[in-house]
Amino acid sequence: MSVIHQSLSTSISSSSSTFLGHNNLKSIKSSNVSIPGRINVVIECVATPSAEITAYKTKVSRNENMGKLQAGYLFPEIARRRTAHMLKYPDAQVISLGIGDTTEPIPEVITSSMAKRSYALSTVEGYSGYGAEQGEKQLRASIAKTYYENLGIEEDDVFVSDGAKSDISRLQVLFGSKVTMAVQDPSYPAYVDSSVILGQTGQFQKDVEKYGNIEYMKCTPENGFFPDLSATRRTDIIFFCSPNNPTGYAASREQLTRLVEFAKENGSIIVYDSAYAMYVSDDSPRSIFEIPGAKEVSMEVSSFSKYAGFTGVRLGWTAIPKELLYSDGFPVAKDFNRIVCTCFNGASNIAQAGGLACVSPEGIKAMHEVVGFYKENTDIIVEAFNSLGFKVYGGKNAPYVWIYFPGQSSWDVFSEILEKTHVVTTPGGGFGPGGEGFIRVSAFGHRENILEACRRFKQLYK
Amino acid sequence: MHTFLTLSFTTCKTLFQPIARMAVEEKGLVSYCTKVERNANLEKLQYNYLFPEIDVRELRHIKKYPNAKVISLGIGDTTEPIPDMVALSMANYAKSLATPQGYKGYGAEQGNKELKQAIAETFYKDTGIKDSEVFISDGSQCDISRLQMLFGSNVSIAVQDPSFPAYIDSSVIIGQTGDIEKESGRYQNIAYMECGPRNNFFPDLSKTPRTDIIFFCSPNNPTGHASSREQLERLVDFAQQNGSIIVYDSAYAVYITDGPRSIYEIPGARKVAIEVSSFSKIAGFTGVRLGWTVVPEELVYSNGFPVINDFNRIVCTCFNGASNVAQAGGLACLSSDGFKAVLSNVDYYKENAEILVNTFTSLGLRVYGGTNAPYVWVHFPGSDSWDVFNEILEKTHIITVPGSGFGPGGREFIRVTAFGHRENILEASERLRSYLS
């Protein structure tokens, strides 16, 4: 790989609490914090052999929004660290509780439906070409019925996608660069990163580790992991994930009612990420649409990834109520439909066949079993850290355990755990400054790996 | 496809406006509105995306003539079944996901390594393209928008006129353009490179202003013209002189009988071009969803930053990989037997194209394309393409696509696709001969 690649690809210094680039980048950064674009130019001069300086360059300016991003996306960075660690310790049995990647096989009722659809595509009667960009009719209807029965969300409010991550970016494209947004802090990195890419934000402010123009709504043990809305500025869009990645906290009905009211008072739009809704154990709401008035102020994004192990198959959906209107009365769903028709061409028909099986009675039962398995894993992890005297959060309504490690940089804790137990976790700082002081342990894994990881944690922290 | 929130259309020729404040007007009540302003870029779009609009017309026609046998030569939708071994491969892959040994979670966002290697080997042999420069996607339409996100709103673009509507529409959505000029039908700030019979369907580059990005599709949708080596050399030269980036859409390359298939066959292209392609029209994967984009390492911005680094960041942040089942299918398509099988479908569609070319030619019409692409581009001088579209639909129950849907340069043309069952192609030819002679 070229030297330029090496110097610009992220290899994070573990002694910093933010996500910086390579050492070269770090030392230059300290003298020139606020202009990442220029930093890249400086690196080129330092790192590039003289022969390459005369190499042809186009006259196209780099998108300055890309230049605002501080480093690589969080999860590829975790993967890089894991790979580096495995190279360093080829005999170690590395256990991955970092990236929230599902591990258990997909239930057969679902895979057989995908196999059947695949075969059908080789027959005259069964072949289908382009599907509706919004998704296959039956699947849309079944999603509406399964997840939104009696909530007033209908088949044509549901837009099937290749997953929540793609949907989040398409929503950003929909909203455009002139909207302001609020996120929980900590939060799933795609909300902030896509916002930066679309040009909604200012520069990264290194001292506070926040991008300008984003409203960060701190969610900590002190406020019960629900933002203090009285201290939250109005923004156009509010990204809200519940059950939360990474904290695992599921907002209560009362809290979500306040959130909806807040959005209504401010004329804001909530983008509610319910990807982990099936992990809810108690009576916390599973859909924002359970809250009266929510349809006028929110849309909901969800996914089959963590229910059916579809992380590689790629299938999700976004539900946009007809009542959700822009300030001029134009329905948001109409523009989203235009985006979906222009910037997308539908989820894979085979994945959709799988999705249809997921929401069949047998499929729902099977998904609950898969979810139940991961929830048992979560219980084991929670118990392990509790027994070691840690302050443990989450884990009840989500497959994530959020553990407090006060006084240390979360990247340092991450590194120490990795080095000493060969277990990959995710440093809380990767989810925003509000995640500093925490480690996220995901509960996706084979049972024996979960148990082994907990044995190792107990060994390290006894 | 669907009419979701119903859009009302005025006459066939005119532009149909989206209706604002629909809820308020329809219900007669004052509905709650958020205070979020509608994205002004979406407002600039003058009409629906072209192909859902064709669908709507088809549905309306079917409703009007429930007994007519409507033949769709409109949307370029493949019709022939996927080869057995490709389908089998996907079925087996799906089944393996139910086993502990076979289960796979998240794949690399850039795509499966084996598949990338197979693509580099099959399509870019001897061009120096490496598998690390190949990014697997869920299709060109998605890739085009991800490329627009990559470039951002401050770049200028050039497109062929006519062209596949996604280039222009995504450009408007991302904020690169001004408003549409009603008289010309062109968006401000886009350079339209006319491609017509007079210039042999290759733009007059001497009259083309410099833009940052040049979208270029060859073989072309909708005109069917495949640029010659000499033409592409001039294009690469032009890009190099202007410091522009070519986004080369090679989705129909396998339909070329004779001529360059990849922009990277042209010396110097690695420094100036991105190539986007797709399994849709190669393997009938229009519903399965699989494509790829090549970004060479040498392609750098004005500040020397490699475009591939940023594209990789986009792919990791705004996407999560193509479906693993689809990728398994892609790999099967590129096996020795698989590739033979998919190419035989391509030949089938090319034979269809030949039949259609002959039909229109025999009627004394000026016909273009159809030899290196699955599209036939028929000239109706002095006509408005929507009128011709409507007339053909009304009188022969055949769906085509009016050329102006691809840009003002398509105004006098009709695009007829060669995707269809043979008997439908033959039947359509019969009807056209009867009606147009």
Image (cartoon, coloured by chain):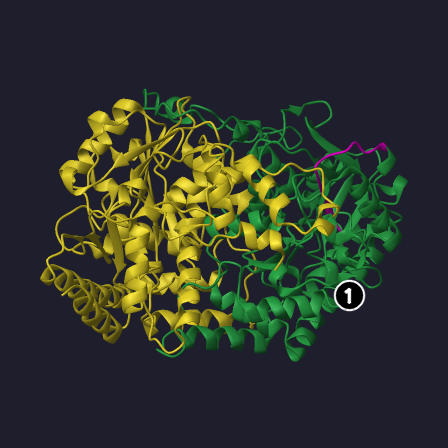
| Magenta span of residues | B207-219
- Judging from the image, what is the letter of the chain drawn in green? B
B361 over B87 or under it: above or below: above
Measured as percent of width and height from the top left, residue B137 is found at: 55, 57
User: Which chain wears yellow?
Assistant: A
Judge whether residue B386 is colored magenta: no
Q: Is residue B266 left or right of residue A335?
A: right
Q: Which residue is mark 1?
A: B351
Q: In terms of image quadrants, where is residue B211?
A: top right
Task: Please check the rendered image and state whether residue B216 is part of the magenta-colored stretch, yes or no.
Answer: yes
Image vertical order of residue B412 relative to residue A283, above or below: above
Residue A417 visible here: yes
Q: Chain of mark 1?
A: B
Residue B347 is situated, as x and y percent measured from the top left of the image, at: 74, 68
- Quadrant of the image for the N terminus of chain A? bottom right
Disc 1, SS: helix
Residue at image x 64%, y 72%?
B334
